[in-house]
Amino acid sequence: MIVVRDAILTATIVALIFLAAHRPPIVKDNQTPYCQVDVLQSMRHPFTGEKVSAWGPMYRPCGEQDIYREI
């Protein structure tokens, strides 16, 4: 009975060591988080051809939330 218990314990330890040594590598999260940011957008009016600017929502990287750039 003791031999069976020792064999099961040894097999369990060997299996745990094998699983720990052969687990898949950790996947790095390199995705840029995007947030909804209000940006100044401009376009030409479809009827008059006049340039119109307005603030509107757009998805941009979250690091650009507090950055203002005049284009």
Image (cartoon, rainbow, N blue to C red):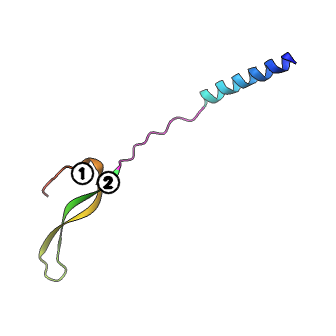
How far apart are the alpha carbons under marks 1 and 2? Answer: 8 Å
Does the magenta-highlighted stretch encompass residue 31?
yes
Tell me which corner region of the image, top left, top right, bottom left or bottom right, holds residue 41: bottom left
- In the image, what residue occupies the spot 23% across and 59% down? 38
Q: Amino acid at mark 1?
A: Gln
Is label 1 in contact with label 2 (beta carbons under 8 Å)? yes
Residue 4 horizontal/vertical position (percent): 84, 20
The quarter of the image holding the N terminus is top right
Residue 48 horizontal/vertical position (percent): 13, 82
Mark 1 — residue? 65
Secondary structure under the numbered disc 1 in the rendered image: loop
Q: Amino acid at mark 2?
A: Cys
Secondary structure under the numbered disc 2 in the rendered image: strand
Mark 2 — residue? 35
In the rendered structure, which segment of residues is drawn in magenta?
Answer: 23-33
Does the magenta-highlighted stretch encompass residue 26?
yes
Residue 2 horizontal/vertical position (percent): 84, 16
Asked if 60 appears above or below 20 in the picture, the reply is: below
Per the picture, the main secondary structure of the magenta-coloured stretch is loop
Tell me which corner region of the image, top left, top right, bottom left or bottom right, holds residue 20: top right
- In the image, what residue occupies the spot 65% across and 24% down? 17
Tell me which corner region of the image, top left, top right, bottom left or bottom right, holds residue 44: bottom left
Mark drawn on residue 21: none
Residue 24 horizontal/vertical position (percent): 56, 35
In this view, the residue farthest toward the bottom is: 47
- In the image, what residue occupies the spot 19% across and 80% down? 46
